Image: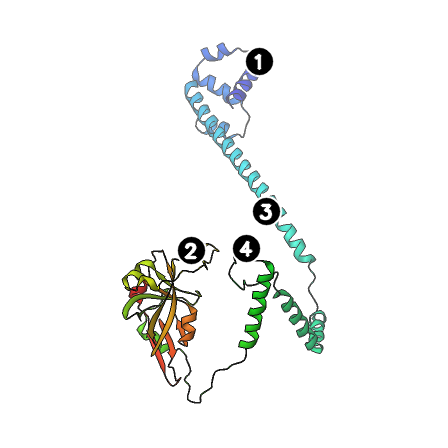
C-alpha cells in the first residue's frame, strides 16, 4: 500500500510539474493534502485520511504502516484458510474413494429370493435319510485311524534264541489265550461284586496324583511302603529290604532271566526267593526278584499277585478291594497317602 501511495504521489507531482523536494519543503498540511489527492478514492486508507486528516507527514506514515500491517495479517489469515480448506477437500476425496467401493459392492450383491431359500429346504425334507447317510459316511471317514500300532506281546528275548523258538512261544501264547477264554471259575449265587462309590472318596484327600502304597505282612514282618503296580509282571524286592527281612541266603536262587524295563533296558537280578505274603485272609507263597536298586519303596507287588488275591486296585479311591477266598465278602486294603507322597 505504501508503494502504491508513493506511485500515486509521483504521478501527482508529474502532473503539476512538481518535485518531491518541493512538496516536502512546503507546509505539512499542503503535503498531506497533496498525498490525499494522489490516492484512489473509496479505499479504507483514503477514507481514514479524509475523516481524520493527519497534520504532519510523520503521522500519515504511521497510519499508513498500521494499515499495511492490517492488510498483511488479513492476507496471512486468508492463506491459512485456503490451506485448511484444501486439506479438508483432499481428506473428503480420500474418504469418498474408500466409501464408494463398499457401496458399489453392496449394491451389486444380489439378495436371494424366497424361492431360492425354500427349494433346498424342500429337497432336504424330501430326502432326510439320504442326508443322514451322507453325514454318517463323512463322520466315519473322519474317524478312521491313519496308522495302527500293534502291542508288543512279549518282552525282548536273548539274541541267541532262534526265530523258530520265538514262533513256538507265540503259538503257545495263542493257545493259552483260547483255552483261557473259557471261564472255569465256579459261579456262586452269593458272590459279591467289586465296585467303587463316591463314599470311598470320603477318606481320600482329593484331587491327588498319588500311587497306591499299602502295608503287607511278608515273611512274618510288617513291611510298609509297598507299591501296588499292575503294570509290572514280577514282584520286586530291593537288596536292602531282602537283608532286613532276615531271609537265609541259601533260599536265594539264581535266575537267567533279566528284567526288562519300559524303555527296553535290561537289568540282571541278584536272584529269586519265595516268601509268604499274608493279605485278604490268604497266605500265598510269592516269588520275588531280588535286585540291586535303591527305590523309594520297600516292595513292588505286580499284577500276578493282584490276580491271585482277586483284587482290584484303584489309585483314585486309594484302596485295593479283594474278594474273600469263598467269595462271600469284600476285603479292603487301604492305601497310605502320606507314605505315597
User: CB under 8 Å between callouts 3 and 1?
Assistant: no
Q: Quadrant of residue 138?
A: bottom right
Say which of 2 and 336 sits in front.
Answer: 336
Q: Earlier in the sequence, mark 4 or mark 3?
A: 3
Residue at the spot of label 4: 160
Residue 268 disc label = 2
Query: Residue 48 at x, y = what percent?
Result: 46, 29
212 is higher (above) or lower (below) than 283: above
Q: CA distance from mark 1 to mark 4?
A: 136 Å
Residue at the spot of label 3: 95
22 is higher (above) or lower (below) than 114: above
How many residues crowd around disc 4 within 10 Å: few (fewer than 14), some, or many (20 or more)?
few
Q: Earlier in the sequence, mark 2 or mark 1?
A: 1
Say which of 319 and 4 sits in front.
Answer: 319
| Callout 2: SS | loop
Q: CA distance from mark 4 to mark 2?
A: 17 Å
Q: Earlier in the sequence, mark 4 or mark 2?
A: 4
Q: CA distance from mark 3 to mark 1?
A: 60 Å
Residue 94 seen in the current view: yes
- Nearer to us of marks 1 and 4 is 4
- Nearer to us of marks 3 and 1 is 3
User: CB under 8 Å between callouts 2 and 3?
Assistant: no
How many residues crowd around disc 1 within 10 Å: few (fewer than 14), some, or many (20 or more)?
few
Residue 14 disc label = 1
171 is higher (above) or lower (below) than 10: below
Amino acid at each position: 500500500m505504501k508503494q502504491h501511495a508513493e506511485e500515486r504521489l509521483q504521478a501527482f507531482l508529474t502532473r503539476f510539474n512538481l518535485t518531491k523536494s518541493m512538496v516536502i519543503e512546503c507546509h505539512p498540511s499542503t503535503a498531506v493534502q497533496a498525498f490525499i489527492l494522489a490516492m484512489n478514492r473509496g479505499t479504507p486508507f483514503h477514507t481514514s485520511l479524509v475523516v481524520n486528516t493527519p497534520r504532519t507527514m510523520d503521522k500519515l506514515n504511521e497510519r499508513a504502516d498500521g494499515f499495511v500491517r492490517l492488510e498483511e495479517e488479513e492476507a496471512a489469515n486468508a492463506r491459512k484458510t485456503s490451506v485448511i480448506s484444501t486439506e479438508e477437500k483432499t481428506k473428503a476425496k480420500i474418504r469418498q474413494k474408500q466409501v464408494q467401493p463398499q457401496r458399489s459392492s453392496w449394491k451389486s450383491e444380489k439378495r436371494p429370493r424366497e424361492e431360492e431359500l425354500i427349494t433346498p429346504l424342500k429337497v432336504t425334507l424330501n430326502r432326510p435319510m439320504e442326508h443322514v447317510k451322507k453325514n454318517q459316511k463323512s463322520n466315519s471317514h473322519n474317524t478312521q485311524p491313519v496308522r495302527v500300532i500293534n502291542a508288543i506281546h512279549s518282552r525282548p528275548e536273548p539274541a541267541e534264541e532262534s526265530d523258530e523258538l520265538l514262533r513256538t512261544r507265540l503259538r503257545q501264547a495263542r493257545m493259552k489265550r483260547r483255552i483261557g477264554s473259557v471261564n472255569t471259575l465256579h459261579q456262586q449265587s452269593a458272590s459279591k461284586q467289586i465296585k467303587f462309590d463316591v463314599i470311598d472318596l470320603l477318606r481320600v484327600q482329593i484331587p491327588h496324583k498319588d500311587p497306591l502304597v499299602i502295608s503287607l505282612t511278608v515273611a512274618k514282618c510288617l513291611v510298609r511302603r509297598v507299591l501296588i503296580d499292575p503294570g509290572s509282571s514280577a514282584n520286586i524286592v530291593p537288596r536292602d529290604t531282602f537283608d532286613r527281612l532276615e531271609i537265609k541266603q541259601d533260599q536265594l536262587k539264581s535266575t537267567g532271566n533279566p528284567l526288562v524295563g519300559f524303555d527296553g533296558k535290561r537289568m540282571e537280578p541278584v536272584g529269586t526267593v519265595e516268601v509268604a505274603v499274608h493279605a485278604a485272609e490268604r497266605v500265598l507263597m510269592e516269588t520275588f526278584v531280588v535286585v540291586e536298586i535303591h527305590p523309594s519303596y520297600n516292595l513292588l507287588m505286580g499284577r500276578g499277585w493282584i490276580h491271585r488275591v482277586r483284587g482290584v486296585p484303584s489309585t483314585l479311591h486309594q484302596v485295593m478291594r479283594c474278594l474273600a477266598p469263598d467269595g462271600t465278602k469284600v476285603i479292603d486294603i487301604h492305601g497310605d497317602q502320606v507314605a505315597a507322597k
